[in-house]
Amino acid sequence: MAGRKTVEERIKLIDEKIAKKQSEIDVLEAQKQKLLHPVTMRAVIAKAKESGFSPEEIAEKLGLEV
């Protein structure tokens, strides 16, 4: 019976597979969220304006000379 794995070894292998698949799922979930909620320059500028930043302040924060 050499070569047979114990129940504990088999469980450990299954747990490793589950962990690998879970990390793959996490990556896919992150990709899905990026697609559902894309960050655009227009959205960023709009949020900055909503927060009370003037165009000059936004340019300053970005290190731009206007």
Image: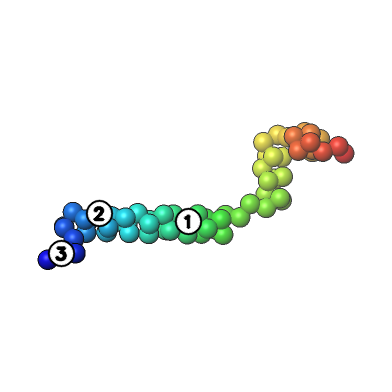
Q: Is residue 25 left or right of residue 54?
A: left
Q: How far apart are the two marked residues, 3 and 2, measured between alpha carbons? A: 19 Å
Residue 11 placed where, x, y %? 22, 56
Question: Exactly how many numbered labels are in the figure?
Answer: 3
Residue 34 in view here? yes
Residue type at mark 2 is Lys
Q: Nearer the viewer, mark 2 or mark 1?
A: 2
Q: Earlier in the sequence, mark 3 or mark 1?
A: 3
**Is residue 19 shown above or below 53?**
below
The amino acid at mark 3 is Ala
Disc 2 element? helix
Mark 3 vs mark 1, foreground winner is 3
Q: Which is nearer the eye, 47 or 39?
A: 39
Residue 59 shows which numbered tag?
Answer: none
Per the image, label 3 sits on a secondary structure element best described as loop
Q: Cα distance, mark 3 to mark 1?
A: 39 Å
Is label 2 in contact with label 1 (beta carbons under 8 Å)?
A: no
> What x and y, as percent, mark residue 14?
27, 59
Q: How is the image coloured?
A: rainbow
Q: Quadrant of the N terminus?
A: bottom left
Residue at the spot of label 3? 2
Mark 1: few/some/many CA within 10 Å (<14, 14-19, 20+)? few
Q: Residue at x 37, y 59 (%)?
A: 21
- Give the side of residue 16 with respect to residue 54, left or right: left
Name which residue type carries label 1: Val
Residue at the extreme right of the image, as rendered: 66
Above or below for 49 versus 39: above
Can you tell which mark lies on residue 12? 2
Viewed as shown, does residue 53 lie left or right of 10?
Answer: right
Asked if residue 22 lies left or right of residue 45, the reply is: left
Residue drawn 71% across and 50% down? 41
- Residue 27 marker: 1
